[in-house]
Amino acid sequence: MATEELNIIAIELGSSKVIGVAGVKRRDGKIEVIANVQQDSATFIRKGVIYNADLATSCVRNIIARLTEKLQKEITQVYVCYSGQGVHSVHNEVNRLFENEHKIVKEDIDGIYEENVNHVYEGQSILDAIPQEFSVGTQKVLNAVGVLSGNVTGRYLNIVAKSKLLNNLQTCFQEVGVQVVDYKLTPLVVADQLLNDAQKNSGCVLVDIGADTTTVSIYKSKLLRFLSVIPLGSDNITKDIMSLQLEHSEAEELMTSKFGEPYASFTEEEGEAVIKVTADGVQIQRKTLSAVIDARLTEILMNVKQQINESKYARESLVAGAFLTGGGANMPNIANVFKEVVGIDKVSVRKNSQSADYVLPDGIKNTESRYLAALGLIANANQNCTAEMKRAGGDFFDPPVVDNPPVQGNPDDNDFSETPEKPKKSRIEKLKEWFNKFAEE
């Protein structure tokens, strides 16, 4: 149970949206969402990777300004989650030999971990490292501390990607000028929201069908064992539907409507029914739409099947089955299509967190799956992200009072000989102007 209330700011950068959520962790353990904003990101993020730094920086600034306006609090730091094309898992082993039989201590394990995370992958960075098991002599254990042995081998699952994925993200927040408490991988955060320990223990695959990418995560014995991001997503299906002379919004609406059913078992008469007439008078039949969706969705799921095969975890070993999430999981009948293509019989669609500790506003309740990553960041956060703005002098706000504020630059370089001029406009007024500027754009 929390000993004090914490105000947490979570930002998720996705290929279709950047989402900002402000939540309060109450003393009773409940998490209440008090503000949420979002902005389209397709103009500067492609397949999870920032490719236009200026637009990304402007977007993040706008998200923070809008949250500040809603909260009437100073945002001092944030939690961030991300993913992207090229993120994948790699196994690595680190061996440590001792001169004599030795009781393994925590410092030994920490040293092995450090050696692992310092492993160099050319052109790539380690985004996270997950211990798998330790070999001590002829034994395999999850915790080697206290075991007597002349050697120990640590096995790790390293999550890696091209260095620019995280570098571009860090540069963006540095330009904004806001401190990031922690960067977390979206697939790991979402998995903790959707899967319980029993499912992770017995083995399962989580397939997140996003706009530009599809992420495959495999769990067994409570640990992540495999992760891969496929550069195909639901927006590829939407673009295929647009070839029927439809606008993007119309195509997306059709994809998730009752008519957007891949592998549909409708009759010939039902298949010939006209479900949409374009602005140019072109009639779209139900069977035509189904065929377009079938082709691309099958390609995506065949890639999912290939990734499961490469994980070397047999589908029958995934006792808990498959869980589908993301915007693409909203297509009707997708669970049956997944069973047919991938070959896993136990399939379910997950949209809501398994935790009952959230208090959500009406605007999120019906679209909770879109906010799962941000909610997961808030659930695991332990540092306060806001400070009160205190009025001074009647027409402007002093900088927030923060315990042990970070020192920026060399204190000796600061000149305190002159009293700074009083600002002409209040901070809140400037934030409002800032917010209105971005709103107009």
Image (cartoon, rainbow, N blue to C red):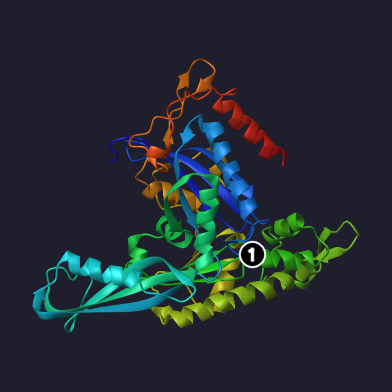
Viewer-proximal residue among 150 and 213: 150
Q: Residue at x 80, y 67 (%)?
A: 243
- The N terminus: image quadrant: top left
Q: Position of residue 192 (x, y in %)?
A: 40, 58
Q: Residue at x 38, y 38 (%)?
A: 412
In-image side of 387 versus 291 (left or right): left
Vertical relation: 11 (above or below) 238: above
In-image side of 1 versus 434 (left or right): left
In-image side of 406 versus 250 (left or right): left
Q: Residue at x 30, y 39 (%)?
A: 2
Q: Position of residue 242 (x, y in %)?
A: 78, 64
- The C terminus: image quadrant: top right
Q: Residue at x 62, y 64 (%)?
A: 212
Q: Which residue is mark 1?
A: 234
Q: Position of residue 286 (x, y in %)?
A: 77, 66
Viewer-proximal residue among 139 and 424: 424
Q: Position of residue 360 (x, y in %)?
A: 48, 40
Question: Which secondary structure, mark 1?
Answer: helix
Vertical relation: 261 (above or below) 56: below
Res. 54 visible in picture: yes
Q: Quadrant for residue 13, please give it.
A: bottom right
Q: How many marks?
A: 1
Res. 263 visible in picture: no
In-image side of 403 versus 337 (left or right): left
Amino acid tagged 1? Ser
